[in-house]
Amino acid sequence: MELRTAEAERSAEAERTAEAERTAEELRAADVERAVEQALALVGRQAQAAHLPPDRSDETGGSARPDGSARPNGPARPARPAGSARPARPAPPAAPGETSGANGARSGAPVPPGRPPTAPLTSTPAHRARATPWSEARALAERLGRVAPRAAHRLPLDRSLGHVLAEAVVALTDLPSFDTSAMDGWVVAGPGPWNVRDGEGLLAGRGTAEPLPDGEAVRIATGARIPVDATAVIRSEHARTDVAKGMLHGTREVVPGQDIRPRGQECRSGDLLLPVGTLVTPPVLGLAAAAGYDALVAVPRPRVDVLVLGDELLTGGLPHDGLIRDALGPMLGPWLRSLGAEVTGTRRLGDDADALREALTTSDADLILTTGGTAAGPVDHVHPVLAGTGAELLVDGVAVRPGHPMLLARLTDGGPYLVGLPGNPLAAVSGLLTLAEPLLRGIAGRLPQDAYRAPVREAVQGHPHDTRLVPVVHHTDSVVALHYNGPAMLRGIAAADGLAVVPPGGVRSGTEVEILDLPWASATPWTEGCFT
C-alpha cells in the first residue's frame, strides 16, 4: 500500500514538473515575440513604445581589442559568482506624457505626434541591467532587415549576379519554342527502312524544315528544328546506312518521339520560372537568358561602411612595441561581400571620437559596422558618440559568448543601422552572425536561412547563463567542436564550416544543436586535424 502511494506521489510530481516546464516555455516564447515587436516600434514600424533592456558588460572587464587583449585602462567589473543570475528588472509603467526607451528609462518629454519614441543612450549600470537573449537579438535584426524599405532597379544580365530578384521571372515564350532534335543523327518519318535524302541535312538555326514524307530520312544536328510529320530521331550510333542502295536501317527499335524535345517541354509561356527573393546565381542568369530576358529587376546590394577603431593596430608586418596586427579589417570586407553586401571601403579611424562622429553622420550606407570600442573604457567612444548623435539603441549587449558587448543602433532621421562589433576577433564573428548577417539578409531581400540541427560528437561545455557559439566541422553524422575557440582566436573558425549554438549549461554527446552555416561551408577542404 505504501509503495502504491509513493508511486502515485512521484507520478503526480512528474506531471506538475512537466506542466511547469510547458508553461515556462510558452512564457519565454511570448516574451521573445513581444520584445521583438516593441523594438521594431523604435524605428517607426509600429505605433507603440518599445522596451529592450540591454547590457554592455564586457567578457574581459574592459574593452576588447582585435588582438584579443583588454584595453589596459578599462574599468574592471567584478566577476559574477558562478550560478548566480541577474534578475531581469521589469520596466515600470510610463506615466501620462512619458515614454519608455529601449533601456527602460523614462523620459518626461512627450512624444511629438507621428514620431516614434527615441531610446536615449546612457552608460549607467541601470542601463545594463541585462543583455538581450541571443535568439531574441537575432530575430530582431532579421525582422528589421525584412521591413526596411527597398528600392528596385533594372540590371543587365552581366551585372545581376549576386543580387536578389525584386520581380519574378516569368516565361516569355515556350521553352523550347519549337520541336528540336536532342541528338546528332537522322530524323525519320514512318516505319523503316528509310530512303536517305541527299544534301547537308538539317542544322541548328537554319530556319524552317520542309515536311518529311513517310519512308524518308535526313541528317539532323542537335538543336535543329524537327520537320513536320517526322516520327523520331535515330542517333548516329544506332543507325546503319546502305550506301549502295541509299537506305537507312535502325539497329535498335525506333520509338515514336524518341530523342525529340517537344515544344514547351521545359515551360509554357506565362509559367513562373523564378519567384521574388531568388538569389541570382550563374544558372539563374542562364535560365533568364534562355527565356528571352536581357535584364532583371533586382534589389540593390546593401551598402556597408566598415570602420576599424583602435590606435594600436598595424596594417602590415609583425606586431611590435605593443602594436598588433588588424585581423578584422582584412576579414570583414570579403565576409560581407559573401553575404551580398557592397562594401564601400574599410576605414581605420583609430581612437578618435571626432573622426567616428564625422564618419557616422556623413555615411550614406545602409549599414555601418564598427570594430571595438563598444564597452566603457576611457577610449571606447562608440556609446558616447551614438548618444551625441541621438541614435536609437535597439540592442546593447547580447547574452552570448563570445561577443557579449555587441550592439545594434539606428542613426537619426532614418539614417543607417549601426552594428558595433567587439574588438576580439572571434567575438566580432559572433556579432557579425548574430546581428549583421540577418539584418543584411533582410535588406538585400534574401530569404531567411532554414534553421537546421545536428548532433555533436562529444560533449560541449556551455556558459552558465549565456548562449555559446562554438566553431565546428561537419562529419557524416555529427559535428565536431574545434579547439582554439576563445574570444581572441581565429584558428578554430578558420578551419570551421559552421558554428554550433550551444545553450547555457552545455550539451552532452549526441545532443542536437542549431548550426549556423558559414558562407563558404561547401568549399571548405579542411578536416579537424590539428584543431581538435
Image (tube, rainbow, N blue to C red):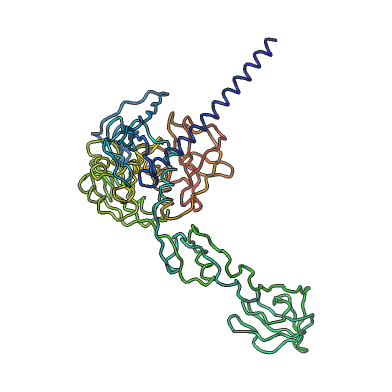
User: Going by the image, does 118 lie left or right of 14?
Assistant: left
Q: Residue at x 52, y 38 (%)?
A: 513
| Residue 109 % position (x, y) | 26, 38
Q: Nearer the viewer, residue 351 or 270?
A: 270
Q: Is residue 320 visible?
A: no
Residue situated furthest left in the rendering = 354
Q: Residue at x 25, y 41 (%)?
A: 387
Task: Examine the rendered structure and indicate whether residue 200 appears above or below residue 174.
Answer: below
In the picture, the quarter occupied by the N terminus is: top right
User: Going by the image, does 335 lie left or right of 323?
Assistant: right
Q: Nearer the viewer, residue 11 or 468?
A: 11
Task: Examine the rendered structure and indicate whether residue 238 appears above or below residue 303.
Answer: below
Q: Quadrant of residue 121?
A: top left
Q: Is residue 230 visible?
A: yes
Q: Quadrant of residue 429?
A: top left
Number of labelled discs? 0
Task: Examine the rendered structure and indicate whether residue 325 appears above or below residue 89.
Answer: below
Residue situated furthest top in the rendering = 2
Q: Residue at x 34, y 51 (%)?
A: 367
| Residue 399 % position (x, y) | 40, 35
Q: Nearer the viewer, residue 252 or 302?
A: 302
| Residue 433 % position (x, y) | 42, 45
| Residue 362 % position (x, y) | 25, 54
User: Going by the image, does 192 lie left or right of 398?
Assistant: right
